[in-house]
Amino acid sequence: MRASNLYAPTLRNTPAEAEIVSHQLMYRAGFIRKSAGGMYTFLPLAWRTIRKIEQIIREEMDAAGGQEIMMPILQPSELWEESGRWSVYGAEMMRIKDRHGRDFCLGPTHEEMMTALVRDEVRSYKQLPLLLYQIQDKFRDERRPRFGLMRSREFIMQDLYSFDKDVEAMNVSYKKMYDAYARIFTRCGLAFRPVEADNGAIGGGHSHEFTVLAENGESSIAVCTKCDYAASDEKAELAVIKAQEEEQLPLEKVATPNTSTIEALVDFLKVPVEKTIKAVAYQTDAGELVLAFVRGDHEVNEIKVLNAIEGAQELAMAEEALITAAGGCAGFMSPIGIKAGTHIVVDATVMEMYNAVAGANEKDAHYKNVNPKRDFTNEGLIVTDIRLVKEGDPCPHCGAPLTMTRGIEAGQVFTLGTKYSEAMGAKFLDENGKEHPLYMGCYGIGVGRTMAAAIEQNNDEDGIVWPRAIAPFEVLVVAVNAKKDDQLAYAEEIYGECQKAGFDTLLDDRKERAGVKFKDADLIGYPLRITIGPKAVEEGDIEVKIRKTGEVHHFTRENYLEEVKKLLSTL
Ligand code: ATP
Ligand code: MG
């Protein structure tokens, strides 16, 4: 490929809407252009990278026993009615009607379609395990599409679905996919962590996210400083902290004017923050009140609260009227005196406190000497871990301190159990002719998000620094002055030799100034640049620059191919 033919319009300036570096660089380096909010065209350079990531995915999926298929993107509502998700998927689902008024959606994911496919064909345990995957566009009408390919409304996803005969076999498939995903991100040249994750709306079993480490990532993850435990902040389990035992003093109501925040309360009563109890009020999608309580210096993990409430799909901040009707008072809340029928979820650490301070459920008043085990007598009280992890919390596996880092969720794997197969009647006959529902797993990688994550992780002030495996081209040959026939001819020869040696090479034959071409080379981020100027033509001096380190090597015409090969293998 010659740069004179390449459609890669580079820009000096960054469009205002591009907030993060990967988005800015993809714009400036001529990789993507926007068509509408959260929808992008991949230009040739981007498409080459996408194709390379997809190829790595395909090789690993096939090696793990996956078979590639292609399903329609349009999905009939009937299948989603069967699984029960048509009504609960919400505004993120892009819904359309055909000319007959029938409902369809643009697939946000394909559990229903896959389950429907196999239920009609898979009859016997002999057909299992079955692993089917596709790489195609998915659609999600995200509340806030942003960060370019990171969170778009139309995006490319690889999604695999596994079907097995029992839990053990399902876990074997899960492990296979987990390992394959780890190989994919390793082969892409990315620093990542598989982290224990919440299952979210998809339901059932266990899950890991593959998080590409990056400072600006949207995901916050807790990583043990000693063992290999890592979990998303939503998921990270926390052990109960037991306070020093004290004699339980009698409950006492005290006036605490203008202390609706923990800071104000601590200041006013001069108590340590670890002696206070904090409340957060939510309401479920069914309009039921949920009161969550954690220690004053802790934060509530909303996902854990949601998981604790059976049947709830979503939580929102509670309306004040709902709180008042339950006998509560915003800013001054405790479980004491809250009406029956309210969901009350107390963090397990709170139950181990002695003589603490908590709201009195009236304005400007708190209770002192609250002893939760004695005083929280509400019927149906739920005690569980609802705390949000923070830096320094103990690891649930080894007790060493956890450290918080950030990253980008590039892939996620789930076991689904029989959630979909039971709802949709996907059954098979075992060795004894007995009928069982299929055990499923699902696995997804965001291909565009992986590309964006690679840039987030690998860039400098001059532009992108591609890992070799997913660079649009591995080697760039620049004819310094392409108006000079001898330089251009020499560069053409080198280009031909590089191609023959199997390097994925681009020749910059544009009749631009050298400075412009070098700037573009750094911006686009080719791993190696071979510079062909007068010294090459006259002395056979081949200059090779490594994008990542800025190192410059000088080789001879005789040895440069060997040396380039060696250098590439390190990038
Ligand atoms: P998120 O929590 O970031 O919204 P998700 O957990 O809903 O993502 P999954 O259903 O697990 O996403 O989808 C599998 C993969 O698809 C994700 O790991 C991510 O890489 C990618 N993906 C999901 N939503 C988007 C999006 N809006 N734009 C680009 N990629 C996405
Ligand atoms: Mg996910």
Image (cartoon, rainbow, N blue to C red):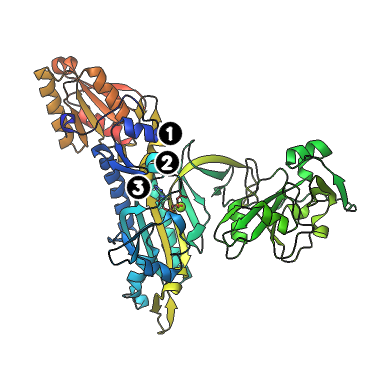
x and y percentages locating residue 61 in the rendered image: 33, 56
Number of the label disc, if any, that sits on residue 447: 3
The residue that label 1 is drawn on is: 19
Discs 2, 1 touching: Cβ within 8 Å: yes
Q: Amino acid at mark 2?
A: Arg
Name the spot of residue 508 as percent of width and height, x first.
Answer: 19, 27
Q: Which residue is mark 2?
A: 146
Q: Residue at x 39, y 35 (%)?
A: 22
User: Is the shortest distance between ligand 1 and the CB of mark 1 under 8 Å?
Assistant: no
Mark 1 surroundings within 10 Å by alpha-carbon count, few (fewer than 14), some (14 through 19), many (20 or more): few
Residue 562 visible in this rendered orientation of the protein: yes
Relative to residue 511, is residue 343 drawn left or right? right
Q: Residue furthest bottom?
A: 433
Label 2: element kind: loop
Question: Between residues 508 and 128, which one lies in front from this camera angle?
Answer: 508
State yes or no: discs 3 and 2 in contact (Cβ < 8 Å). Answer: no
